[in-house]
Image: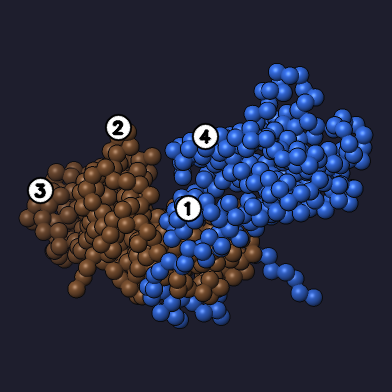
Chain colours: A brown, B blue
Amino acid sequence: MDTAALEVVDLVKRYGSTTAVTGLSFTARPGAVTALLGPNGAGKTSTIEICEGFRRADGGSVRVLGLDPIGDATALKPRVGVMPQSGGVPTGARAAEWLRLMASFHASPIEPDLLLERLGLTSAGRTPFRRLSGGQQQRLSLACAVVGRPEIVFLDEPTAGLDPQARMATWDLVTALRTAGVAVILTTHHMEEAERLSDHVVIIDHGAVVAEGAPDELTGRRRDVRFSTDAPIDADALRAALPEGGTVATVTAGGRYEHTVTAEDPESPGPEFLAVVAAWCASAGVLAEDLRVRRRTLEDVFLETTGRELRD
Amino acid sequence: MMTEHTFGATVADSATPTLADDPGLFSPAPGAAPMWRMVAAQARMELRVMLRHGEQFLLTMVIPVLLLVGFSLVNVLDVGEGPRVDALTPGILALAIMSTSFTGLAIGTGFERRYGVLKRLGATPLSRFGLLAAKTLAVLAVQSIQITLLGVVALLLGWEPALSPAGVIAALALVLLATAAFSSLALLMAGTLRAEATLAGANLVYVLMLGLGGVLFPTSSFPAPMEQAVSVLPITALASGLREVLAHGALPSVGTFLILGVWTVVCGLLASRLFRWE
């Protein structure tokens, strides 16, 4: 029953000598939110722009609603909603008139005034685009993407630079689209956004998928024990004390040492595991501050799969 | 007394309906509007943005009217033989045509490209042909307003154009062909240069063509080699062609149409090959 709304297979995109996308594959379902999550420069925008038909792939294939984004563009465009990362509206155009223009390109659009009202933009309707706040510009751009009642929408960083209220409004809209059966594909580097909003997360790094699944599939039921100290500890001794093996990882932050202790079976660090760690600390004379058992978050998965070094 | 609410609402407050109240709002119902409706809507939008833009309004309406009124009333420039307004009006009309179909179009399109508007429109059901058609309609609409405005001002100044049916048809054909030539050149610049370069270049070309192109006085007052050099400019062809028709009651030469035709074909071909949408 689940026909894919979007199918990306072995996608390759090169710019000169650099390869931005290196054999990337994933699918997205209708009535579901698929988040492409990755650090800057991971290839998210390249991927989404190929799906939108703005760029040509150098290898692999993309099918949007079963069609080719460039070859079948005329048939596809009425069915696809697009929100670019920024801009896309003439600076002198007023919010309401631009949305009405976008609506007039479609056979049975959502009433523009209603959409403006639902997005809290009614009072900004006569304001030229350049004088809208960043959040208002983003919401107008979002409204333009959905006004034609598309079957699939591509949102490129829909909440970048938004204040918390505007972000919540955007999340509400994405949820409403999902409920209506629209396939939503969005890019983000907000972990919380991906975790709360999406049915399927595709973590991309260096142009390829490094992990994918439902948010709780990705985070799993995995737990670990964490604590911090103000001096280094003997990690090898702690590891040797663990019942069935396991790992001890330490990072230094702000002059403190943050330790993560993982059991051999990461899904079952039981009460006795915590007791072993606490007992070892006591015998070694280490005061374990902020000792806690913690569920893995999407951020942990993200950092594990994409590494911790800074990107530009 | 009510004060005007000038802040943009941040989010819908609790009193207004929210997205959750209307789950069917986003039920997919895709489909493109008929082509004519898309083109008409886009053309209206282009027209509004053009007329609302302060500097463009100055360039397309205010400057031509001021030049016409000023040089008709004040005897500071040798505009050629006959009543001053009769000699000036054809050239000013040519300038007005150029200001819209070249300067305004180039700058507007250049910044649309810069701000991702052309790219965004490329993702809508409006085709590139539809977009070009809409821009053409908007340019022609502005030019109709300009011709009407300048015609009325000139008549008030005592303009007595030499009008014959053949002359009117020839003048309209000249205007349309010149519009095609100027628009092709505008799109060539806007689609290949950076927006700032287009802005500077289009204004520079406007000033140069105003000075050199036989707008305020016939190019016959230039030295012969210079007259020949500027005679191949599209503005010179349009201005001298309109002067032939409206001041002298003659028909423009075939060469005039040929010059505008060559500009159209060359710039049009180059623009269609080199135009970058983003």
Which mark is on residue B266?
A: 4
Dot 2: what SS?
A: loop
How many neighbours does mark 4 have within 10 angstroms: few (below 14), some (14-19), or many (20 or more)? few
Q: Return the x and y of residue B31 as percentages of the image width and height.
A: 40, 69
Dot 3: what SS?
A: helix
Pointer 4 and pointer 1 on the same chain: yes
Q: Alpha carbon of mark 4 to alpha carbon of mark 1: how far?
A: 19 Å
Q: Hey, what amino acid is under mark 1?
A: Phe
Relative to B59, is A244 on the left or the right? Answer: left
Q: Hey, what amino acid is under mark 3?
A: Ala
- The front one of B62 and B263 is B263
Which mark is on residue B129?
A: 1
Q: Circles 4 and 2: CB distance less than 8 Å?
A: no
Q: Circles 4 and 1: CB distance less than 8 Å?
A: no
> Does the rendering let one see residue A273?
yes
- From this viewpoint, which residue is outermost toward the left? A244
User: Which of the two marks, 2 or 1, is nearer to us in this view?
Assistant: 1
Q: Which chain contains the residue that carries disc 4?
A: B
Q: Which quadrant holds residue A81?
A: bottom left
User: Which of the two marks, 3 or 4, is nearer to us in this view?
Assistant: 4
Q: Circles 2 and 3: CB distance less than 8 Å?
A: no
Q: Is residue A276 above or below residue A14?
A: below
Dot 4: what SS?
A: helix
Q: Which chain contains the residue that carries disc 3?
A: A
